[in-house]
Image: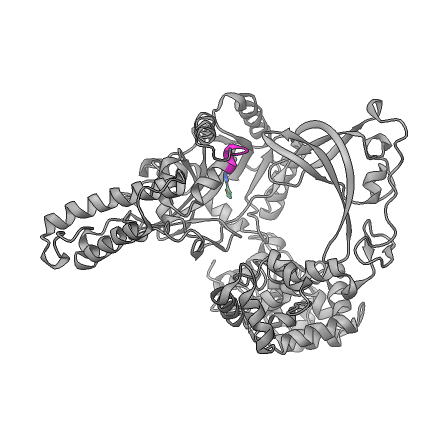
């Protein structure tokens, strides 16, 4: 800006509008030069002046602020990342099927759940499964207000400014429900991918491995000006929160989305059962090479939306849809060596280091070898796999990968086995701490017995502790945790140490602030991020403990069942594996089985582990959980027992409905039962409930109570 520029106060509306357009173009040009071409055309000070002038004019004329204004962009701060967005309705992933029998089983499972006979009509949609990344677009009163990636399904990244640059994404809708979240896939066509890579190469930038990576890399650009130069497509296939239904059927809803201006997949078909679904799968698979974009399977969905609603969800996937994946892609390469990684629970995992090879467009140099039986050519029950062929260092092996999963080894070419290759000897001691590694009866995995003294286990536990679903401490990721673990002046050896970091003596802290790559500001930011996590929801804490078999979903179940840390901790302390009321009550939680329950109780009774948990919790303020399901339903928190024949729904559906409304469903009547729902033929349970004075309803009264009557 030069000195003769008019002060903002003196600008007319038209002058302001014209200048904003000029500024927007100048800033976009500077962004591209800086971020994309790595060749800045103006100084940082001149760039800042443009942004400040833009912001000052917008402040005086807010009505002129454009949706794509440079001030909504984060391009100037590339290190900060995206803001997080909590999805109004979870973004789910799909369960997988690989064989035709699994598709038939999917249909049978749905019929069982809904209580439909094998001949009752049941329609499905079948559509290509695009291999891109999912995106949720939120429209309010027809205007696009937010775009978010899936993330972990609950929380994604706010990529609104970037999504606005995609031509397939309408900025405005007419005749749309007041609130509409449209979900679909962002992807890049083969032709655009090839052209982008050619441009990258010409500019000396890195090439993308495949169209999906290119699409993800382009959408997750901190600078929307770069996204704008990337040829991205969007296809709509679903929806999230809605103020009014789109249609009665999946097919109808897709047509409605199309009418609203979204691209939808023209290969979507209505099928009357597994035979037609498999026929359409075959058609799509045959046409796969000429589609012009990557797909990795076919998605089947129940067409009737009322049935989708009744079917609902399992932990992370809908019951009403499944992805039928194409067979995995294969390639041959040489096994260079086998390395053993030690995980957070002490599991010794063998990893194949391979001569790099391209499998389905991705360069693969590692594959999992699962466990020692797998290397030896047998499964966990001792039966041969790969016709009993073992895997040896130096062998030619066939690698395959399906979708996102870690590559695996499918086969060995014995004709190419080098002379003198020896069977692999699985270590009997931990390669990290030297402790004995043992294999318990019935376990396919050998585990290090070093526990807390094993540095590999301790570091992996810490990495888990700070991971996304756990404490998720900004600035303290896997890399930093490794550094702190190995640091002798300012060590973090267990989770509690994270919360004492700041309280250590001043001289030690000064060392952190002077350390290379740290500086006073990043150290202060880290302390602030740690402070922010001293208050932690119960489910995150349970998950963060890293107890075997307790994942995020289970941690959430446990939290919603016990509600407070004290209740949870007391129950785990008082429980004995295999007996007693605390044990029974733990097992009565739907989703908690013997294996998880044993693992939990054992962890709380292991003195070193227990002491470490206690040291941690002393530093925390644990937030109570809310009970499962809807808290405001008339049956929330009640224990319900179903007995006799239900006529309007199957037992499985009744149980899932009740649980979704916050009720606990038990198998037998006891003093803790609040309600008995008795259909015709109810026997001893109805009698016992009458003796105990427990309220008993018939099926219709139950449906009326929960609002389904
Ligand atoms: C893809 N990737 O093409 C779904 N998808 O539906 C289609 N993904 C989906 N549907 C529910 N066509 C969750 C994911």
387 displayed left or right of 574: right
Residue closest to the eye, 456 or 643: 456
Q: How is the image coloured?
A: one colour
Q: Is residue 671 visible?
A: no
Q: In the image, is residue 328 above or below residue 468? A: above
Q: Where is residue 308 shown, x and y percent of the image?
A: 50, 46
Q: Quadrant of residue 406?
A: top right
Q: In the image, is residue 131 above or below residue 605? A: above
User: Residue at coordinates 86% horizontally, 33% vertically from top-left?
Assistant: 388
Q: Which residues are magenta?
A: 208-213
Q: Where is residue 631 shown, x and y percent of the image?
A: 49, 68
Q: Where is residue 685 shown, x and y percent of the image?
A: 69, 67
402 displayed left or right of 700: right
Q: Where is residue 421 shown, x and y percent of the image?
A: 88, 32
| 212 in the magenta segment | yes
Q: Quadrant of residue 491?
A: bottom right
User: Residue at coordinates 53% horizontally, 59% vertically from top-left?
Assistant: 517
User: Residue at coordinates 58% horizontally, 29% vertically from top-left?
Assistant: 361
Q: Quadrant of residue 562?
A: bottom right
605 displayed left or right of 90: right
Q: In the image, is residue 254 above or below residue 494? A: above
| 171 in the magenta segment | no
Q: Is residue 418 visible?
A: yes
């Amino acid at each position: 800006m030069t000195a003769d520029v008019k002060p903002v106060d003196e600008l007319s509306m038209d002058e302001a509008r014209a200048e904003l357009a000029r500024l927007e173009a100048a800033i976009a040009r500077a962004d591209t030069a800086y971020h994309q071409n790595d060749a800045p055309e103006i100084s940082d000070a001149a760039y800042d002046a443009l942004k400040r002038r833009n912001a000052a004019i917008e402040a005086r004329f807010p009505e002129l602020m454009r949706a794509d204004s440079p001030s909504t962009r984060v391009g100037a701060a590339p290190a900060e990342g995206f803001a997080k967005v909590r999805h109004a309705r979870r973004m789910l992933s799909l369960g997988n099927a690989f064989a035709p029998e699994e598709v038939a089983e999917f249909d049978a499972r749905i019929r069982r759940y809904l209580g439909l006979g094998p001949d009752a009509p049941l329609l499905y949609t079948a559509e290509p499964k695009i291999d891109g990344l999912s995106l949720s677009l939120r429209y309010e009163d027809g205007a696009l207000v937010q775009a978010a990636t899936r993330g972990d399904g609950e929380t994604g990244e706010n990529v609104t400014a970037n999504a606005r640059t995609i031509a397939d994404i309408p900025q405005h809708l007419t005749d749309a429900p007041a609130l509409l979240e449209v979900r679909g896939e962002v992807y890049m066509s083969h032709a655009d991918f090839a052209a982008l890579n050619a441009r990258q190469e010409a500019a000396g930038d890195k090439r993308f491995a495949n169209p999906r990576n290119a699409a993800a890399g382009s959408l997750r650009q901190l600078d929307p000006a770069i996204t704008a130069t990337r040829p991205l497509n969007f296809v709509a296939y679903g929806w999230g929160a809605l103020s009014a239904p789109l249609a009665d059927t999946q097919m109808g809803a897709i047509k409605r989305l199309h009418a609203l201006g979204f691209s939808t997949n023209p290969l979507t078909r209505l099928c009357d059962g597994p035979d037609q679904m498999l026929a359409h799968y075959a058609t799509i698979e045959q046409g796969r090479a000429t589609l012009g974009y990557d797909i990795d399977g076919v998605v089947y969905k129940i067409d009737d939306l009322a049935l989708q609603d009744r079917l609902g969800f399992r932990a992370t996937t809908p019951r009403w849809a499944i992805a039928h994946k194409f067979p995995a892609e294969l390639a041959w390469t040489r096994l260079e060596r086998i390395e053993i990684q030690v995980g957070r629970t002490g599991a010794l995992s063998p990893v194949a280091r391979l001569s790099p090879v391209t499998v389905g467009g991705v360069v693969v140099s590692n594959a999992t070898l699962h466990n020692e039986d797998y290397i030896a050519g047998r499964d966990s029950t001792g039966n041969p796999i790969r016709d009993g062929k073992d895997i040896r260092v130096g062998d030619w092996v066939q690698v395959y990968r399906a979708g996102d999963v870690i590559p695996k080894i499918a086969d060995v070419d014995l004709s190419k086995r080098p002379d003198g290759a020896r069977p692999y000897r699985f270590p009997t001691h931990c390669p990290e701490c030297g402790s004995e590694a043992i294999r318990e009866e019935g376990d396919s995995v050998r585990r290090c017995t070093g526990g807390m003294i094993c540095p590999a286990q301790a570091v992996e536990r810490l990495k888990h502790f700070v991971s996304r679903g756990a404490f998720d401490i900004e600035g303290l990721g896997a890399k930093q945790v490794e550094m702190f673990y190995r640091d002798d002046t300012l060590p973090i050896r267990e989770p509690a140490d994270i919360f004492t970091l700041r309280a250590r003596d001043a001289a030690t802290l000064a060392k952190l602030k002077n350390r290379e790559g740290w500086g006073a500001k990043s150290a202060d930011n880290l302390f602030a991020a740690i402070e922010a996590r001293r208050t932690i929801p119960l489910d995150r804490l349970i998950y963060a403990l890293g107890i075997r078999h307790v994942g995020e979903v289970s941690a959430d179940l446990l939290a919603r069942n016990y509600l407070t840390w004290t209740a949870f901790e007391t129950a785990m302390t008082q429980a004995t594996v295999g007996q007693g009321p605390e044990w029974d009550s733990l097992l009565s939680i739907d989703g908690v089985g013997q294996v998880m329950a044993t693992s939990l109780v054992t962890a709380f009774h292991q003195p070193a582990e227990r002491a470490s948990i206690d040291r941690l919790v002393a530093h925390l303020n644990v937030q109570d959980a809310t009970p499962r399901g809807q808290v405001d339903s008339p049956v929330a928190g009640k224990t319900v027992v179903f007995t006799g024949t239900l006529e309007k729904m199957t037992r499985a559906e009744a149980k899932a409905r009740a649980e979704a409304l916050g009720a606990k469903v038990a198998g037998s009547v006891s003093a803790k039962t609040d309600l008995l729902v008795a259909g015709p033929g109810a026997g001893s349970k109805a009698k016992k409930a009458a003796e105990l004075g427990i309220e008993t309803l018939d099926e219709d009264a139950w449906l009326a109570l929960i609002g389904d009557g």
